Image: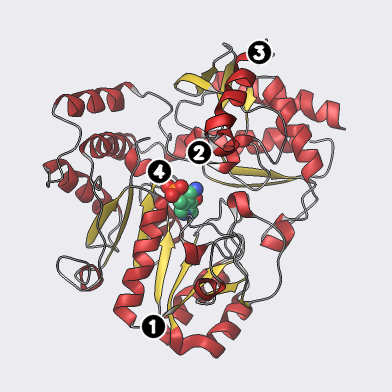
């Protein structure tokens, strides 16, 4: 399992950096948080990827969430192949869009209609526009360390590649250059798992708040699990003040259950955003909700939203086949069993204080004694220890996400062999660390 060489990845990384900023098309891929050279991937199958040097890597990134069935699932590949031969894009409606919409809505009884876009970023951006259009209000609330894509107003105290320590509730500065403070002004920031803080925010701003957007299980600060009190406060406060509740299920949708976190946690959001799994590895996002809201979207209503490649037939085909397989096989107990054994194995092997946060097939190992339920607790993790953990695993052929503040994902293709190899590597790495 040990690494032969990464010389080809190094050469490609140098070449890439000449023509692509940082050599990557999404920041976390560059290994900035952990150092070293990112692996350039040649191909993947099931739970495994092969880099351009021929190293075999056991994948815990899963393309950051979409690959719940593992890579290149034969049925998904075949569905794409069939769709390809019919043409790649028409800019006109197709039956596949209806099929994917029906599959999504069957799993989410809280939604009557869904609109497809091409990324999670577009999904959350469009859902917020809709919430503002419906309520006639300007302010939105997001949670510190939650990430909802890179639309201007959402790059405020954002998680994922942007995660850094921050201050109290209320108005906050943008997390990115190029976001005018005037845009960030309309984004109010609250602490996750802090119902009292959210209540204070609503007491002050309630009449101006169009929507609260949240990750129902956080993946983008590492995994954080919502408390029942926090979830109850989201529902109560948004209803009381006439704001819409937007569940960002881009990561969790069809992963934590067929009906995502909404089903698993019994949520009642007004709007839901999806991405990742519903595209089966192709670029897709979607947002949906009750017909009374969705009727406000163009061409029916005054809230404009469009896309040249929205509902792309290849992406629809990959999504349809993925959701069909998930509906037929309901692999959530299998994923839970793998996750429970992985979690227990990591805890058993740990030679230093760790907190393993896991919900279903999303897991993060934080390097401190915990508990880790909030952003403030997440950022206390020993990121130096994480770096050693990450590189130790990578040297042993286990490809963990290259940042402390991300979720690791596994798939239905992760079985006994994969679990054994992972835990063997984890054991060796902890021995070296401790
Ligand atoms: N919302 C959540 C919860 C996400 O995790 C992400 C991406 N990781 C997004 C939105 C943005 O999705 P995309 O990268 O497809 O734009």
Looking at the image, tell me whether mark 3 or mark 4 is earlier in sequence order.
Answer: 3
> Picture coordinates of residue 127 (x, y %)?
35, 65
Question: Residue 266, located in which quarter of the rendered image?
Answer: bottom left
| Pick the front one: 403 or 431 | 403
Assess mark 4: CB under 8 A from ligand 1? yes
| Pick the front one: 212 or 314 | 314
Q: Which residue is mark 3?
A: 1
Element under disc 1: loop
Looking at the image, tell me whether mark 2 or mark 4 is earlier in sequence order.
Answer: 2
Residues at marks 2 and 3 touching, judged by CB atoms closer than 8 Å: no
**Is 258 left or right of 106, judged from the image as shown?**
right
Question: Residue 218, located in which quarter of the rendered image?
Answer: bottom right
> Picture coordinates of residue 426 (x, y %)?
72, 28
Element under disc 3: loop
> Picture coordinates of residue 271 (x, y %)?
34, 66
Q: Taking the image as drawn, is residue 146 in sight?
A: yes
Q: Which residue is mark 2?
A: 25
User: Viewer-nearest of labels 1 and 3?
Assistant: 1
Label 1 Cα neighbours within 10 Å, binned few <14 / some 14-19 / many ≥20: some
**Is 328 left or right of 340, judged from the image as shown?**
left
Label 4 Cα neighbours within 10 Å, binned few <14 / some 14-19 / many ≥20: many
Residue 143, placed above or below residue 57: below
Q: Taking the image as drawn, is residue 256 in sight?
A: no
Residues at marks 1 and 2 touching, judged by CB atoms closer than 8 Å: no
Residue 72's disc number: none
Element under disc 4: helix
Q: Which residue is mark 1?
A: 137
Q: Which residue is mark 4?
A: 276
Residue 393, placed above or below residue 383: above
Separation of disc 1 and disc 2 at Cα?
A: 34 Å
């Amino acid at each position: 399992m040990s690494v032969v060489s990464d010389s080809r990845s190094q050469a490609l990384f140098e070449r890439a950096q000449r023509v692509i900023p940082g050599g990557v098309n999404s920041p976390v891929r560059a290994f900035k948080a952990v150092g070293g050279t990112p692996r350039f991937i040649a191909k993947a199958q099931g739970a495994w990827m092969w880099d351009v040097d021929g190293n075999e890597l056991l994948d815990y990134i899963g393309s950051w969430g979409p690959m719940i069935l593992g890579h290149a699932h034969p049925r998904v590949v075949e569905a794409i192949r069939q769709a390809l031969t019919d043409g790649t894009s028409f800019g006109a409606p197709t039956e596949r869009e209806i099929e994917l919409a029906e599959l999504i809505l069957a799993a989410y009884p809280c939604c009557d209609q869904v609109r497809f876009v091409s990324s999670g970023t577009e999904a959350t951006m469009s859902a917020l526009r809709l919430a503002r259009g419906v309520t006639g209000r300007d302010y939105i609330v997001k949670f510190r360390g939650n990430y909802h894509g890179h639309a201007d107003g959402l790059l405020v105290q954002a998680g994922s590649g942007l995660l850094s320590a921050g201050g109290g509730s209320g108005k906050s500065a943008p997390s990115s250059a190029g976001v005018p403070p005037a845009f960030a002004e309309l984004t109010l920031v609250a602490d996750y798992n802090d119902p009292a803080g959210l209540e204070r925010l609503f007491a002050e701003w309630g009449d101006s708040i169009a929507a609260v957007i949240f990750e129902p299980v956080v993946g983008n600060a590492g995994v954080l699990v919502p408390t029942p009190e926090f979830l109850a406060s989201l529902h109560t406060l948004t209803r009381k003040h006439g704001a819409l509740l937007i569940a960002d299920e881009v990561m969790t949708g069809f992963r934590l259950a067929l009906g995502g976190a909404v089903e698993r946690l019994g949520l009642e959001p007004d709007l839901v955003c999806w991405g990742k799994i519903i595209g089966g590895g192709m670029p897709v996002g979607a947002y949906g909700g009750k017909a009374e809201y969705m009727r406000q979207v163009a061409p029916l209503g005054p809230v404009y939203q469009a896309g040249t490649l929205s509902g792309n037939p290849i992406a629809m085909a990959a999504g349809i086949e993925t959701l069909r397989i998930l509906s037929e096989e309901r692999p959530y107990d299998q994923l839970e069993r793998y996750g429970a054994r992985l979690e227990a194995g990591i805890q058993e092997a740990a030679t230093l204080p760790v907190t393993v946060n896991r919900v279903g097939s999303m897991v993060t190992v934080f390097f401190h004694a915990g508990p880790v339920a909030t952003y403030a607790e997440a950022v206390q993790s020993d990121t130096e220890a994480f770096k050693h953990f990450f590189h130790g695993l990578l040297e042993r052929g286990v490809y963990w996400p290259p940042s402390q503040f991300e979720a690791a994902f596994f798939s239905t293709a992760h079985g006994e062999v994969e679990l054994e190899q992972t835990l063997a590597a984890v054991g060796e790495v902890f021995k070296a660390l401790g």
